[in-house]
Image (cartoon, helix red, strand yellow):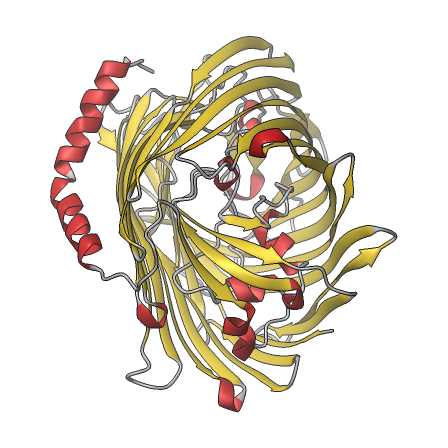
Amino acid sequence: MMMKAPGFFPRGTRRGGAEIVQESALTLRRLCPSAVAAIALAAAVPGVGRTTEPMQVTSYPREFFEGFAPSTAFDMVARVPGFTLDQGESRRGFGDAGGNVLINGARPGSKAGGAREALSRIPASAVVRIDLVTNPTTSEASGQAVIVNLILRETSLSGSWGVSVSRNREGDIRPYMEASLSGPIAGWRASGRVQFDAWREPANGIRRRSGPAGELRLFEQERRVADEVEITLAGDARRETLGGEIVLNGRLEGSDSDTRFDGPGFMGRQPSGPADQFRGVGFAEDILEAEFGGEWTRRLQNAWSLKVLSLGSWRQEDSASGSRIETPPGTPVSETLANSRRTLIEWVARATVSTNVGGRFRPEAGGEAAFNRLDSTLAYATRDGAGTLTPIVLPAANIVVDEQRAEGFVNLAYDLNPRWTLDAKAAAEWSEISVTGDARNRQRLTFFKPALSLAWRPNPNASLDIGLRRTVGQLDFDAFAASTEVGIDRTQGGNAQLRPQTETRASLDLDVRGRDGLAVNAGVFHEWREDVLEPVILPGGDFGLGNADRARVWGATFGASASLSWLAPGLRLDARGEWRDSVFEDPLTGQSRPLTALIPWTYSVELRQDLPQHKLSWSLQVDGQDAETDYFVPEVNVFEFGPEVRMSVESSYFGNLKLRFSVYNPLGRRFTNERTFFEPTRAAAVTGREFRRWEEGPYFWFTVKDAF
């Protein structure tokens, strides 16, 4: 489980096709040394006797996982060598938002819950095998280079349950409970899951404000406490009907969170004696979310199949925040208050026809229609010590945004020979976005989204893929409306003229498999982004998110899974990481800089030892990332997380009953935030700085899980 970040922080010119092709060719030439090395490595890896096929499949039967005593399919997928679960990306509609998990050859039919939730509903006893597929050619794979496909069987009523308790360094204890059930019910094959989670994160820190020359203006001692309770109900049911199979799925989720931080402040001096002021900030949010959908698949003549899907979701967010300052402590206060409600609605319908004739051609075609709506209201005001309330008007504080969209696509996979596969896709999208309320706008957009990839399989254990793909990003609907963060004195105006970002990506990916579960994958990529979303000065002079011309992003990914049994029996190392860089010409300063919120590097390393003969295992995992930098119009904000460390010991001594004890961040974890202020924008001189630091202590978890 990843611990959550501090709760009070948030989370151009057109080019022709010839220019993109020229830049793509230049990128491939620059990557040539890497490509040559990758090709040589792929060719050198020996095969193991299996016939080479364009789509490589490595099967892991249920027996492979029995030594780990898995309770659910998620426990099994987590043990597939060299595979990392991908929940999917925030892209438009359903077709481009998928992860890298298929169940009986089909994607899970939910966007909100993701693959992890679907896998957690499936008992381990229902899994026949898990196929690791390299270079999948079906649209269900959504452009993924490596996926897993779970092959399930019919089982009688079965399920699993789990109970956890967590304890923070201050002794607060919170529960976590989950249960899933699967089996035949009234002619349907159904599964369901319920989850309850409660947590508390206390932290102690400081806040220091200084002038442009470093002179101390304010020193605060902060105390933060974040509480959240969340409950989720999810399920699906399937049966044969109308000559095919119908699948219905649904999901309900509710959460209630409350974050408070406060403390004494000392004006222009270090803490000593009585405080000069007291500041308190609170933020409360209630979220309700529902998603329901259905899909129907039918085999047609000549090995063709038809799949029709419909999915609808509704989400409502109610939040209230306030900040008060007492100078000196105990005097009448000055307050800043904000209340907002955001309601989001999405509906998607999609139809796909495809064939699995088994020949060299594998065509696929389909279409998608979607409707999205955001209804946002915001009330923002200040109140003085006498109780007088003064409203503050923000642009586009109360708006309704509607998007209607349609897309058609054709995909063709062609086996040039047993070792080479060409995969081509052509898609076109039409949409209309309308904004009403405090701001008004209407725009019609058209996008062409081609994709081309070439895969080489020199032997069954190695693959090399080169691809070029154009995609359209998901609209950030929240940016259409004004927002405020009273705890850090930041407001953002709404922008009714937003359009989605587009991206053209060239990539080269290598995947190598060996004995004892050895898996190595690496890739390099280069992206050309247009209409990038960056903080800008809006037409009315306010600050907000807007489309800011174009940028380039490039980087590399790496993953490895290897047995270290030569050091100790059952010892295994898994590691993955990503490095990224970017260049963007800042319209405010006229200088080049990285993109906002682009994290330069991330990593995850896990050392694990499984001792099946003792029914025992242990693991040590470290996750880390570089600082995240946001370039707002009047400030630069740098937020840095310390590495997260998790240590676990797990026992299956009592059969299906699993006991696990985990410690998160045994030495604590640090978060820092540095803000540099400018007046009126970053193109002017520095007017001040702020530094904040928080320290979290260790968390202890004890978990009991069982399957039946």
At 60% from the left and 74% from the top, the residue drawn is 170
Q: How far across and how far down the image is residue 19, in percent?
A: 22, 17
Q: Is residue 707 above or below residue 282?
A: below
At 42% from the left and 63% from the top, the residue drawn is 670
* Figure quadrant of the N terminus: bottom right
Of 125 and 382, nearer the camera is 125
Q: Is residue 524 above or below residue 446?
A: below
Of 310 and 330, nearer the camera is 310
Residue 707: tell me if it is visible: yes
Of 268 and 97, nearer the camera is 97
Of 556 and 40, nearer the camera is 40
Residue 219: tell me if it is visible: no
100 horizontally vs 110: left or right = left
Q: Tell which residue pokes out farthest to the bottom in this image.
A: 614
33 horizontally vs 428: left or right = left
Q: Is residue 514 above or below residue 134?
A: below
Label tally: 0
Q: Tell which residue pokes out farthest to the right in this image.
A: 186
634 horizontally vs 255: left or right = left
Q: How far across and how far down the image is residue 280, in percent?
A: 60, 51
Q: Quadrant of residue 572?
A: bottom left
* Figure quadrant of the C terminus: bottom right
At 62% from the left and 30% from the top, the residue drawn is 301
Q: Quadrant of residue 650?
A: bottom right
Q: How far across and how far down the image is residue 253, in percent?
A: 72, 48
Q: Is residue 299 above or below residue 640?
A: above
